[in-house]
Image (cartoon, grey):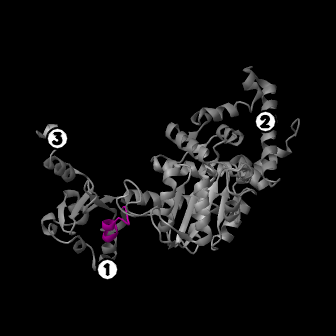
């Protein structure tokens, strides 16, 4: 059979690996290095001929060898699917990724190590972090910000409960930041050095959910060629985040309840009980009390999860937070897209404040990314926002809705009246705090005071 009929030959594959811009090192099942491409020579500062045939551990520093040996063992026995670690050398930052290579019979044949230069990415992350620190005020908690009265109790509960071992149930509409809450709780906990393992209960079919959560033994079912740890075991001494817990089928709920009660898991196809040391954070956008009443969610499991509830308010109830969040997102995306910092026009601010945000903070973030990409100037206008924002903005001015041209004193009076309405809305949203209202409107406190003193019909 010719090479064209049987696919590319070994020489072609080797040529591909040799020409890749990422550093490639491959070691066989005895950890002997058998391949080093040109990029790896450059990244590592080595010569391939001096390393071919050597043990993979020999190219690492003595202090790192014990750790690397444990990684290689995990890849070999299947307890680890991959491993990634950063490496800084000669002023550059590299990401080293280790992958086990197996043949069609699932036999371990070697370890593939890929080195990527992530210096620019890490520098960009550092610059973004510094920029966020400048923009964020004292009204911040992890990756979330909010000066609104609705968010301050949320931040307080996070700060107070993060060091505890209590189970937490995070509720709120889609896009309100439930996963950010879980990350912040983990980072502030005594388990922060351990893993944060996420399970999206809605994304897995019932047949796979249990094996994902509890693991399985070799031969437990067709295709189970080796044992596998479930998410509970993977999260040992860390945090397990059960996202969309309301979508979990009743059969899996019963097994989850048993694990929460006894703190042990039993793999599918196994008979031994394995102790687990895991903190549980669950999240849902459903009303679990209604689901309990409808028989869709176990009552006993609900009370096991609802030890400390955290309810995230929708963005439409956090008017004070919309413009600060938009500013932070603009700064982030401007940096990522290598363009000057964009400013929000007055019309864009009004459109943002009027939009109902059914997608909450996620919708705002996506809108700012789109606008940053499409904006051709240095000021983001209403035309740069998604069409649905313009629709709501069109409701602001009655003259625009009727398409009747208005000039002279009528136009001035209409603008004054609309301005008064916006000021009233800002004052109402901030509890009549003029400083916060001025910041929300994007004007100074002095300008706000002058506008409030102007005689306007209906003010």
* Count of numbered circles in the view: 3
Q: Secondary structure at mark 2?
A: helix
Asked if residue 110 lies left or right of residue 141, the reply is: left
Residue segment shown in magenta: 72-81
Which residue position holds label 2? 418
Comparing 443 with 403, the one in front is 403
Q: Secondary structure at mark 1?
A: helix
Which residue position holds label 1? 63
Q: Quadrant of residue 26?
A: bottom left
Q: Quadrant of residue 150?
A: bottom right
Comparing 379 with 181, the one in front is 181
Comparing 120 with 252, the one in front is 252
Residue 298: percent from left, percent from top: 68, 57
Q: Is residue 90 above or below residue 399?
A: below
Contact between marks 1 and 2 (CB within 8 A): the answer is: no
Question: Which residue appears at 11% of the width and 39% of the height?
Answer: 2
Earlier in the chain: of badge 1 and badge 3, it is: 3
């Amino acid at each position: 059979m010719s090479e064209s009929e049987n696919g590319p030959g070994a020489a072609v594959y080797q040529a591909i690996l040799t020409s890749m811009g990422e550093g490639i090192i491959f070691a066989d099942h005895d950890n002997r290095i058998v391949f080093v491409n040109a990029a790896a020579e450059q990244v590592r500062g080595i010569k391939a001929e001096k390393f071919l045939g050597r043990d993979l551990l020999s190219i690492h520093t003595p202090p790192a060898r014990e750790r690397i040996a444990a990684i290689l063992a995990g890849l070999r026995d299947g307890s680890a699917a991959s491993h990634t670690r950063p490496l800084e050398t000669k002023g550059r930052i590299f990401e080293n990724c280790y992958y086990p290579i197996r043949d069609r019979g699932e036999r371990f044949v070697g370890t593939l190590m890929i080195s990527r230069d992530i210096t620019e990415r890490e520098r960009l992350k550092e610059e973004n972090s510094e920029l966020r620190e400048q923009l964020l005020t004292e009204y911040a908690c992890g990756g979330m910000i909010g000066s609104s009265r609705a968010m301050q109790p949320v931040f307080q509960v996070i700060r107070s409960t993060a060091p505890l071992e209590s189970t937490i149930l995070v509720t709120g509409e889609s896009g309100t930041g439930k996963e950010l809450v879980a990350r912040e709780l983990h980072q502030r906990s005594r388990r922060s050095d351990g893993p944060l393992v996420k399970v999206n209960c809605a994304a897995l079919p019932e047949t796979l959910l249990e094996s994902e959560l509890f693991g399985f033994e070799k031969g437990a079912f067709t295709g189970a060629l080796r044992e596998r740890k479930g998410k509970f075991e993977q999260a040992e001494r860390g945090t397990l985040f059960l996202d969309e817990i309301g979508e979990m089928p009743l059969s899996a709920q019963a097994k989850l309840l048993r694990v929460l009660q006894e703190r042990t898991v039993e793999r599918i196809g196994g008979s031994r009980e394995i102790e687990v040391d895991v903190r549980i954070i669950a999240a849902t956008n459903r009303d679990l009390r209604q689901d309990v009443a409808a028989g869709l969610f176990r009552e006993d499991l609900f009370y096991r999860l609802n030890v400390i509830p955290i309810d995230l308010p929708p963005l439409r109830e956090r008017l004070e937070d919309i413009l600060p969040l938009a500013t932070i997102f603009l700064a982030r995306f401007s940096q990522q897209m290598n363009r000057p910092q964009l400013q929000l026009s007055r019309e864009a601010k009004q459109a943002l404040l009027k939009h109902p945000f059914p997608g909450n903070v996620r919708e705002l973030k996506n809108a700012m990314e789109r606008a940053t990409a499409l904006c051709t100037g240095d000021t983001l206008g209403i035309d740069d926002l998604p069409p649905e924002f313009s629709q709501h903005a069109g409701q602001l001015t009655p003259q625009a809705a009727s398409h009747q041209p208005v000039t002279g004193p009528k136009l001035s009076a209409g603008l004054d009246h609309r301005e008064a309405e916006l000021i009233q809305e800002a004052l109402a949203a901030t509890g009549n705090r003029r400083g916060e209202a001025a910041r929300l409107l994007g004007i100074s406190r002095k300008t706000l005071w002058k506008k409030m003193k102007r005689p306007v019909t209906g003010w």
